[in-house]
Image (tube, grey):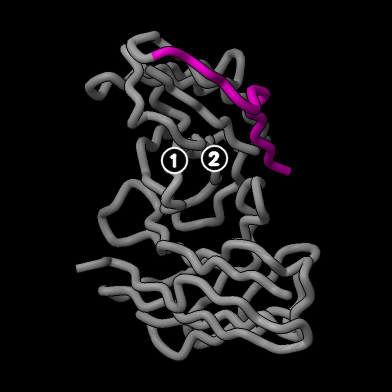
């Protein structure tokens, strides 16, 4: 069985602070994919990143960066210099095959204030 | 233009009635996924819809309650039958488009059952 744990239910930061959202996953498969999605107050799900299990290279995209560590089964997401527009619920998700279902974590609500 | 069009965007329904949600994709896809997001919760997969075969339901979801149609490679419907207030949720369809790294989600149907 697959499982994704996002232990942080809600995080509040002041604008320009850095913030890290934690994600821990469980799977017995050796090939799997990890995802992060953003769900702003409007409700749509916005794809942020996909990482496959064979690629542990960290990735940076603007103010966003992701740290994938197989040794700890974690795929953490850091927002540098947070902005109010980053306020949203962020979901980490996992699947174990091409075009297969996603297993979502419970999400972390990020509130960025001025 | 939207890649996935989901209708209706929201509805308020009487208990005991049924609502059919439509999901139209701009391009052909093999599998379409239907998720439920209960208020303040994460996304849970209801079923996977393949063209030309019966949908595959996840544990806890049954065809009598959530019948799905998939008449072609660009369209699917999910019906929420004999609704009760517990069915009040956001329902989302999702696909993996050819060449895409992440799953694309519809804008969701916000259902309130009174």
Q: Is residue A75 magenta?
A: no
Q: Residue B21: give x, y in percent of width and height.
A: 52, 80
Q: Are marks 1 and 2 on the same chain?
A: yes
Pointer 1 chain: A
Q: Is residue B12 left or right of residue B114?
A: left
Q: Is residue A31 visible in the rendered structure shown here?
A: no
- Closer to the chain start, of discs 1 and 2, is 1
Q: Which residue is pictured at 37% across the width and 17% down the height?
A: A114
User: Magenta span covers which residues?
Assistant: A1-14
Against A49, residue B72 (above or below) is below
Q: Is residue A7 magenta?
A: yes
Against B101, residue B84 (above or below) is below
Residue B108 or residue B54, whichever sits in front: B108
Quarter location, residue B105: bottom left
Q: Which residue is mark 2?
A: A93
Residue B2 or residue B83, whichever sits in front: B83
Quadrant holding the N terminus of chain A: top right
Q: Is residue A18 visible in the rendered structure shown here?
A: yes
Q: Residue A80: give x, y in percent of width and height.
A: 33, 13
Q: Which mark is residue A37?
A: 1
Q: Nearer the viewer, mark 1 or mark 2?
A: 1
């Amino acid at each position: 069985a697959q499982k994704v744990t996002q232990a942080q239910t809600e995080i509040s930061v002041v604008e320009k602070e850095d913030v890290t959202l934690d994600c821990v996953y469980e799977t017995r498969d050796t090939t799997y994919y990890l995802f992060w999605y953003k769900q702003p107050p409007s409700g749509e799900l916005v794809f942020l990143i996909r990482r496959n299990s064979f690629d542990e290279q960290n990735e940076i995209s603007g103010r966003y960066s992701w740290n994938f560590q197989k040794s700890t089964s974690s795929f953490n997401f850091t927002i540098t210099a947070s902005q109010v527009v980053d306020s949203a619920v962020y979901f980490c998700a996992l699947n174990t095959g091409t075009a297969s279902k996603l297993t979502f974590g419970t999400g972390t609500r990020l509130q960025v204030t001025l | 233009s939207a890649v996935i069009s989901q209708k209706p965007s929201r509805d308020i329904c009487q208990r005991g009635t049924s609502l059919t949600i439509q999901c139209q994709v701009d391009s052909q896809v093999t599998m379409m996924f239907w998720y439920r997001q209960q208020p303040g919760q994460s996304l849970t997969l209801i079923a996977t819809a393949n063209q030309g075969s019966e949908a595959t339901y996840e544990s806890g979801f049954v065809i009598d309650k959530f019948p799905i149609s998939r008449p072609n490679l660009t369209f699917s419907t999910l019906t929420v039958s004999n609704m009760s207030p517990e069915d009040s949720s956001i329902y989302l369809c999702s696909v993996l488009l050819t060449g895409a790294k992440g799953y694309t989600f519809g804008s969701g149907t916000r259902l309130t059952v009174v």
